[in-house]
Amino acid sequence: MLKLIASALKRNEETPNVELAEKLAGEQDTKGIAEIVSGLTMDKATANDCIKVLYEIGERSPNLILPYAEVFLDLLKSKNNRLVWGGMTALNQITALCPDKVFHRFEDVVAAYQAGSVITVDNSMSVFAKLCRANPAYEEKILPILIHHFENCRAKEIPQHMERVAGYVTPAGAAWFQAVIGGRYGEMTEAQKARVNKAFRIRKSGQGVS
């Protein structure tokens, strides 16, 4: 399968990686997926393509990448930023299926969030929210981190991040968010306020957002 990734085909685009993910997910090819996982430890171009394939598989069939939760958690400590945010993206897709395993490495998740790129932070919001939903004890530890984030992040980031967490937080957590974000409404445009309000309606209707 490694011969089908973009770098092996000498193509500087993601289309081959997406097509390979669709093939592996459609065929439920666990052996092929294991080969792609092995590519994460190879040269940088190969590793970058492989993480793309893996989280694209996860978007289509998260159970197929669930066995590699520890691999994705290890990637959060990589010196290769592409692997860090790719690992967090993959964790976003499987955290609801293995919250205890992810929470066991919670400090690694937090460290990646704190040092992370925009994409790492975006996906960590979803990971945190899914952990909150999974266990009240997890929410107790995570909620202060999320509240601090919404108190201090840029106003333009509030709607997108609220969309990621609103469908998962508990009523108690939602009350905190409403209080904090209500204090920042003056910093947001009307369009941003509308997105935040819609996100809260999603939470009340019980629809999850990713």
Image (cartoon, helix red, strand yellow):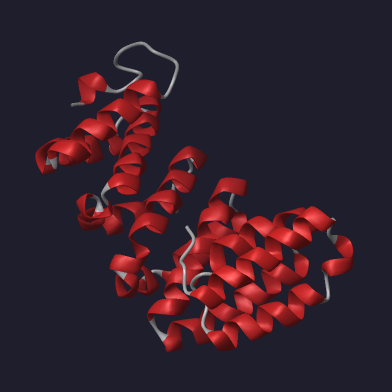
Could you tell whether 56 is left or right of 86 in the image?
left
Residue 162, quarter of picture: bottom right
How many numbered discs?
0
State the image coordinates of residue 85 (x, y, percent, origin top left): 49, 46
State the image coordinates of residue 135 (x, y, percent, origin top left): 39, 84
Could you tell whether 15 is left or right of 111 in the image?
left
Residue occupying the point 37% across, 55% down: 93
- Would you say residue 158 is visible in this rendering? no
Could you tell whether 164 is left or right of 198 in the image?
left
Residue 154, quarter of picture: bottom right
- Would you say residue 1 is visible in this rendering? yes
Residue 14, quarter of picture: top left
Residue occupying the point 83% across, 68% down: 185
Q: Tell which residue pokes out farthest to the right in this image.
A: 186
Could you tell whether 77 is left or right of 42 in the image?
right
Q: Quadrant of the N terminus?
A: top left
State the image coordinates of residue 5 (x, y, percent, origin top left): 29, 23
- In the image, residue 142 sits, relative to residue 125, either above or below, namely below
Residue occupying the point 71% across, 69% down: 150
Q: Nearer the viewer, residue 44 or 177?
A: 177
- In the image, residue 179 sits, relative to residue 17, either above or below, namely below
State the image coordinates of residue 196 (x, y, percent, origin top left): 69, 64
Q: Nearer the viewer, residue 119 or 167?
A: 167
